[in-house]
Amino acid sequence: MNDNEIIDLFLKRDECALSLTSQKYGAAIRGIARNILGDEGEAEECENDTLLIVWNNIPPKEPREHFFPFLARIARNCAIDAYRKKKSKCNNITLVSLDDEIRLNDNAYGSIEAEEKKQELSIILVDFIKQLRADDRIIFIRKYWYYDSIKSISKRMDFSESKVKTSLLRSRNKLSKILKKEGWM
């Protein structure tokens, strides 16, 4: 079944949409969560949370052209929230996030100004990602969006771990220069 048909089921409030989404994208959703949380049980919880959020958001949203990215973003946010809860209980876990890399602090701005700053930063990041070479772009997104490990990325790309690390270092350095130039750092 294609994504549009699944979304039509969501719009009709047919619970089959949940099982079809799980069948089609469940492994990918759990993979995103597992990369962040490192635990299969918690990844399954994130999948369930993701499906519940999707159920509650379709309608009014209809992500027909971008259903998997819609799911992936929700799954990623669920996993990050679960990670933060876990981290507050146990402070010895480290997670590299792009926000930490660029030391973005939204609390320094009012809510309207913070939204404007987020939009501005989003534009800068999208432009930055577009200018990367294809391999560097994939490596960067796999690391900072999907939280894949260096080992996983190197295996997926058929590169040495050293090449992946070098690509990430160079990309972070380029991003750092751009953010400094734009006044973010």
Image (spheres, helix red, strand yellow):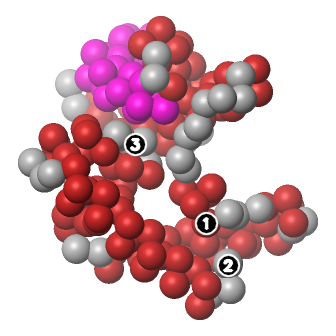
Residue 80 in sight in this render: yes
Closer to the camera in the image, 181 or 32:
181
Left or right of 85, for residue 74: left
Tell me how far mark 3 sits from mark 1, CA to CA. 17 Å
Q: Which residue is mark 1?
A: 102
* Residue type (three-letter) at the residue carrying disc 1: Ile
Q: Amino acid at mark 3?
A: Tyr
Q: In terms of image quadrants, where is residue 64?
A: top left
Vertically, is 69 above or below 8?
below
Question: Of label 3 and label 1, which has the lower sequence position?
Answer: 1
Q: CA distance from mark 2 to mark 3?
A: 24 Å
Disc 1 on helix, strand or loop?
helix
Question: Which quarter of the rendered picture does the C terminus lie within?
Answer: bottom right
- For disc 3, the marked residue is 146
Which residue is at 47% across, 9% downward? 41
Assess whether residue 15 is covered by the magenta stretch: yes
Per the picture, the main secondary structure of the magenta-coloured stretch is: helix
Give the magenta-colored segment's residue range.
9-36
Specify which label sits upstream in the sequence, 1 or 2. Answer: 1
Q: Which mark is residue 184?
A: 2
